[in-house]
Every structure is written in structure tokens, then in C-alpha cells.
Image: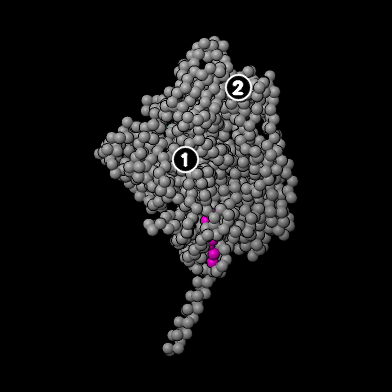
Amino acid sequence: MKKTFSLVLVLCFFLEVFAQQGNNENSVLAVKNERLSLDKGWRFHPGDIPFPIIKGHNATYTSTKAARATGAAAPGYDDKSWRELDLPHDWAVEMPFDSTENLSQGYKQRGYGWYRRHFKLDNSDRGKHLELQFDGIATHATIWVNGTVVHRNWCGYTSSYIDVSPLVKYGDEINTIAIRVDAVAQEGWWYEGAGIYRHTWLVKRSPLHIITDGVYANPVKTASGSWEIPAEITLQNSGKGNVSNIEVEVSVFDKSGKQIAQNTNKTSVKLFDQAIASLSIPVSNPHLWSVDDPYLYTVETKVKQNGKLLDEATTKCGFRTIRFDKDTGFYLNDQPMKLKGTCNHIDHAGVGVAMPNSLWEFRLRKLKEMGSNAYRCAHNPPSREFLEACDSIGIMVMDENRNFNSSPEYIRQLQWLIQRDRNHPSVILWSVFNEEPMQGTEIGYEMVRRMSTEVKKLDTTRPVTAAMNGGLFSEINVSQAADVVGFNYQSYAYDDFRKANPHMCLTSSEDVSCVMQRGQYVTDHSKNLLDSYDTQHPDWGTTHRKSWKDINERPFLAGCFVWTGFDYKGEPTPFAWPTVSSNFGIMDLCGFPKSAYYIYQAFWLDRPILRLEPHWNWPADSIGKNIKVMAISNLDKVKLIVNGKTIAEENVDKYNFNSWDIPYQPGKLEAIGYRSGKEVIRTKVETTDEPVSIQLIADRSSIDGDGWDAMPITVQALDKKGRPVPTANMLIEFEVSGDGKLIGVGNGDPNSHELDKATTRSLYHGLAQAIIQSNENTNGNVIVTAKSKGLKSATISIPVRQVAQIPFVARVSPTLVLDKWLLSPSTTSRPDPNLKLSDNDMNSWEPIRNGQLQTLEKGKYQVYRSTFTPYKLQQTEGGRILFRNLTGKAEIWLNGQLIGTKDKAEASDFVAEFPPLAGDYQLNVLIEGNTGDKVGLGGMVSILDRAITSK
Ligand code: GAL
């Protein structure tokens, strides 16, 4: 008896081990992960496509089921005539300016739009974890995959990660993504663009994998002064059973690729669950990240089981400390540092919000050259690529949440932001809101308290701020729930607030709002014109010079965030139509510097800066009239020489600079700058001659041949001595050939209604910009030619560098595939092949998919039914129905007419032709065989155009 008992125990033990193995190691699929771009080959339909109104019991019943979406969301919808395009795409930027549209959105029509993309998956992808990623869609999006709604994203700035593993088809079958974009929805009072304006991806991973944004590896300095990376790796198991014995290995590499630290930990993940593997990686004497030396380390995370690699991820990190002090402001690596920041929206001339990655790099470089060290993402999460550029260029970021809302869906959006961005050394502040009417109330306070707590659950290393433009002195207000109080304007309250709240850390979160137009030196409200002398601002704002003085002289303020670094479409304050973009920028919409740019160079850079404003090309009737001349500098003394005569030699006013009224005579303005009594810099402005030629200046010496890299080209007109003419305004015509294309044009004029997507653009105060992009897989040249009537043309040839291509999901042209069938019960006597089902009968026929044969259980006949709407061309010209692997004898009936008979029982492909017809088609297939035979639709059934011959 005892023996039997122990035998049973041993047996149970073995069974248990066996079961565990069956569930675990044996079933763990290991695949190399892939992140494939889905940007190419979308079809786009501007405007909405209303869903059909469904009536009738059966149709209603069916339309409510998974994979049975209707209208343009249905896989079989005819999108053949839709425009084909590659992402990122902003349809609003393609629209003309329209005075009846919303000024906040740049007078551009937004509305609704639909996108569709078809793709195939290899049979070998079966079993992998498959995720679609949409980095940003403006503004509300509903996403279907193969006729099933998979996501609704109600924020234009947050990404969507969608597990589509159970829903997709493999082999010859076609998968269809359909997206309805609602850009009537507005989340901002600035230009937001419209459409799928950020990148899209298909990610393939092992079922046991690291989730998207699942590596948290952000170095911290411990209390004892040593450094470590407290890593948290979030794993997910979407395989076939629980998985144990998983090894997570995290290695850190320096810039030269040398491994400097490593650690491992073990974990297990239950089926359809997540687990976090935590481990700490000590790092000794790391090279610190700073704005001057943005040194990045690479973190490689590998997930293994018994030595077999299941998944891996590469992230970057930087070792740096940040600290806000209530009395002395901000510290980076324990060094006091004023935040010299700008606030910015996300659109650029020519491309709108569909920004190529390299334009971010261009913009950040311009800011850095100005002396800026910080950037506020106003008022929404930026793109992933933007933060990568900030990390490597060395710009600190206030990363901002869009929607102020503490309800579950919005907390989820906030969590997404923190989880995605918390490894970036550039990110130093989380901002939960901008100027919310409830900021001075208990409700606002309670909301921020909750949102801040959610942030802290995911990242305790950065403070939470909120950008307040009021409510600061209310008894209960959100400053009491923030770590750093953000002031939007209200410079009058800096001192009073500090006095009342000496324990709080403070920064300006938004300041200035001075308005100016590049190269414009006279303000004329009747013509919507603003001068560039730093004089014009709305009531709530101030000049650049006063604002910086206020902030610079208060050590307790961490720094400034000027509204704005760059102009943006919309918000044309202080004007309305015909002004279509903002005037706040330190640079214009193309990134061309306005006077303010030199003001900040003088404030923020140590090297000698000396800039004379304005140009010296005034019309003949200005001769003798006084013109204000401003010398912007960071020197001790400046001398102004006009046409060879010294006019002034003055000590420099550190904040206001020096200006003089000079009677205009064509010729030369010269300035000499002195430091400690020594000449350190000279500059001049000359009256030029008429323009005679065009000059093109490429931003970089080469472009990468990957189809993504883009580059702005500066366009200007030169006089006969080769001097740029600052007043030139002629129309320029562009031709781009070779290995690239023109993707947009601009000139920075907020009053211009010339199109962004065009092959011509006028110079505005001497400048225009053409943005070119390489073609994929090229290594030749992009040739850009600019012509203008009466001027010598210019041509430049930009070498295209051969680089690794961005792996992408192949384009598939749309094909109407019938994969939803109803199957009748089998009968011994021949049924009426066109037998109609009663409208309320949802149960006597069975819904099936083609591709699997059915056994004729009790009888000789079976009928398959499917309805479809042929593509428009097929309705007018007729078409063919191609049955792959049709098995059994068959009759093909369409709308009650016999269109094909297959006499042989063996499996074969079969084609039936149909004549032109409009509307919905009822297709019935009568199959005949013997009881026990396997018969039916053994393969794909597709509807082909008449012109296409079946293979
Ligand atoms: C602020 C706001 C910004 C912008 C700015 C213009 O109040 O936060 O988004 O509208 O005013 O001055």
C-alpha cells in the first residue's frame, strides 16, 4: 500500500515536471525582433466617408461582430482610387489658406480623413507577438485591423501601441489597416495639422518579450555619491504557457563600444501577464552628460532562456544630476545653470507637423547656436526622435502633457508619456499642464496632486511642474501640489510669490511673447506689420530684453522659457487674417533668425557678439530721414561708424544695448566692439546693389540616401558684388532632380498665402527656404536649381550618402478578398443554390472562413454564401472571381445567375467571370461531393479586375 502511494507520488512529480516543460521551455518561441517602418504605401481619402446605415436583422447582427466593420473600415472597401502617399503626412499643410477657417489653426481646413494600408505577413510570423505602433495622429483616431476596431486614440500627441497578434492573417492573405481621422477635434489653440503625422511601425517579437518602452534604465547618483542604473525591464508573455527561468541581462557600453558594466537577474512570466525584472547596475566614474558635452551610454538589454535569446532592446542613457533649489535655481551636475529655454510648437514651413527627423536636429542646432540650453515642449508630448536629438545635441527639456484631466483615460496618457521618455537625460521636468482655468481652485489642486503622484510612481528623479498664468495667490492652488512652480508671464508676481512661499522652487515656464517679423523695421497695424526692434508685445507679455533682465537678476528663478523659439502656423497675435502664422518666434517659421536671435546670443553666449540692425537698403525717399540703428552686443563698449565717420562710442547697456537715430544715406554702417579696452569684433551692414543672381546654400554637405533624411536649403538673391540683398522679394522657381525630391517651401512671412507644397516661393526680406528629401536607396546626387526672371539661376548638387535603409513593410496593392462565408447544412438532395435565408435566421447556416475544407457529413451538397461590393472598376467593366483550391464539383451563382461550373471534383483553382453590374453582389457556391468527402473553399477567394489574368 505504502509502495503504491509513493509510486503515485513519483508519477505525479514526473507528470508535473512534464506538464511544466510542456508549458514552458519547450513552447517558448525565440525570434529575432524586428521594427519595420509602415510609413510607405498608404492610401488617403480626404473628407469623411459616412458609415452605411444598416437595416435588416441579419445585416445588423453581422455588422456588430468582430472583423465585420462596415464602410471604409471594412477590409473589402474599394480604396483603389485613393491617393497613394508615404507618411508622415499632414493634409492641412497641403490646403490653401482660407479666411473662413479657424485662425488658431492657421486658417487651414482640417476636417476628417481616412487612411488605409494593406500588408502581408509571412507564414513564419505565426506565433510572434505583432504590434502596430502609431507615433502620432492628429487629432482623434479610430483604428481597425481586418475589420475589427482595435483602438481609439483621443489625443493627437500620444502614441498607440496595438497588439494585433490574434487578428492578423498570414501567407497570401492580405491584412488591412483602416484609420478614420477626426481633425475637427482641436486640442490646441495653435496649428495642429491633420493626419498620420508621425511615424508608424510594425514590430515583431518573440511571444516572451520586452514591452514597448519596457526598459527603464536611467542612471542615478546614490546618497553615497556612487552611480548606478536601477533598471526595470517589463516583460510580457503572449505565448502558449507560463515561462520561467528567464534571464534578463543588462549591459552598459561607452561611446567607443566598450562594455563598462553588466548585471543579470532571473524572473518568470505567467501566460498573458507581465512581470518586471529589477536589477541594479553599478557604474564607476561615468563620463557625465551635460549640455556642453552630451555624452551618452548605450544600454543593451537581453532576455534569454537557457542561453537562448528571446528578445533584446537598445536604449541610451546619460549620467547627470539635476536639482532645483528654492533660493538659487537650477543645477546640472551640481553646477548652477540658468535655464535658457524656449517654448515651441511642432510645425515647420513647408511640411507642417509632418516633420522629418532631421528637421528637429536642424532646429535644435539653431537654438544651440543661439546659446539656448533648454526647450519646453509646448504644450504636448514631442516625438521620440525629437528627444533623441535633444539627448545627443545637449538641450534640456520640459516635457509636457497635453490634456489636464485626472480621469483614468487621461492618466493612461500621462503614464505613457513618462514611460516613453524617462530614460532621456535631456528631460529634466514633467509639466502636467499649461494655463488651466482651475489652477487656483481646490479642483485643480486635487487633479495635480493625483497626476503628480502617478508621475512619481514611474519616475522619482524629475520634478513635476505646472505652467500657471494665475491662481498663484489663491488659498488652495496647484502650486501647492507641484515640485517646481511654473510662472507663465506674471513677472510682477515673482517677488511677492517668493515672499509668500519661500519654501517653493520657481521657474518661468513661459515669458516674453514679444512679436516681430524678420527683416521688418516699421510697425504698421493697418498692414499687419511688426518691427524687429523688440518693442511690440501684447499686454500680458514684455520685451525680450526686459524679460531676461527680470529673470536673470533673480537667482531663485531657475530660468526662462521664451514664447517662442520659432514661429508656428496659427495664433497670428496681434492680428487676424491675412496674417496666418504667429509673430512670437525668435526665428521665423523656416528657422531664419529675427533680431531677437542676436539679442539672445548677446545674453547667452560668452564669445563676442556684435550685430547691427537694420539693413541699410532703404528706398530713395528715406534719404535724410532718421532710421533707428541698434547694436546688439555683449561687449563693454561699441563704436558706430557711418560712412567712415565715427558717430558714437559708448559703453554697452547690458540689457537694452545701444541704439541711435541715424539720418539715412546709402553706404556703410560699421561697428567695432571692445572688451577690456581691446577691439574684439567688427561688423558692418552695407547698401547693396540690385539683385543679379540667386544663391542656394545647403544646410549640410551631404544627405543620407534613406528616403527619410531631409535638409533645408537657404535661397537668397545676390548683387553684382556677391552680397545678399536683404530686401529682395522676387518669385523663385525650383527644380529638384536626381536622387531626391522637394517636400516643401517657405519664407517666414506670416502674411504670405503662398502654398507650402509648391515648386515656387517668393523671397521674403531676402530669404526663402526649400526643403529637399532624399529618395530611398540612393547614393548619387540631389540637384536643386532655382530660377527667377532677370536673375542668374543657381544650381547645387548635394551628394547622397549610401546608408543603411530603414527596414519597411512591403506595400501591397488592394485586392478584394472574400473571406467571410456562410455555410449551409449538407443535404442529400440538390438544394436551390440561390436559397435565401430568412432575415431573422442567424443560426441555421454556419459562419466560416475559406482556406479550410469541410467534411460532407450527411449528404452530397453544401452551399456557401458571401456578399460583396465589387470595386468601382469591376462594377463598370465586370470582373473575375478567382477561387484557389476549390474542392469538389461546383456551381458558381452570382445574383441568381450561373456564372461558372466546375465539373471535376479534384482541387483546382477556378475562375468565373462576371458582367458589369452595380451594387452588392450575392455569391452562392453549390458544392457537390460524397458523404465523408472533404470539399469546399480550400484557398483564397478574390475578386479581380477583368484586365488582370489569373496566374
Ligand atoms: C500663452 C499660452 C501660449 C500662447 C501664448 C501667446 O498664454 O500659454 O500657448 O498662446 O500665450 O502669448
Residue at the spot x=46%, y=53% of the render?
Answer: 218
Judged by its main secondary structure, the magenta piece is strand
Using the rendered image of the protein, determine whether residue 312 is visible from the camera's viewpoint: no
In the image, residue 260 above or below residue 430: below
Q: Which quarter of the image is occupied by the N terminus?
A: bottom left
Q: Amino acid at mark 1?
A: Asn
Secondary structure under tag 1 reads loop
Q: Nearer the viewer, residue 179 or 49?
A: 179
Residue at the spot x=50%, y=13% of the render?
Answer: 663
The residue tagged 2 is: 725
Q: Which quadrant holds residue 485? A: top left
**Is the C-beta of the residue carrying label 1 under 8 Å from the nearest atom of ligand 1?**
no
List x then y, in percent, for residue 322. Answer: 41, 48
Q: Which region of the structure is painted magenta?
A: 298-305
Task: Say whether disc 2 or disc 1 marks the residue closer to the N-terminus.
Answer: 1
Q: Nearer the viewer, residue 750 or 542?
A: 542
Q: Is residue 410 left or right of residue 567?
A: left
List x then y, in percent, for residue 826. Answer: 60, 59
- Examine the structure image and report whether residue 304 is included in the region drawn in magenta: yes
List x then y, in percent, for residue 32. Answer: 60, 59
Residue at the spot x=49%, y=55% of the render?
Answer: 286
- Examine the structure image and report whether residue 182 is included in the region drawn in magenta: no
List x then y, in percent, for residue 162. Answer: 51, 50
The residue tagged 1 is: 373
Q: Amino acid at mark 2?
A: Val
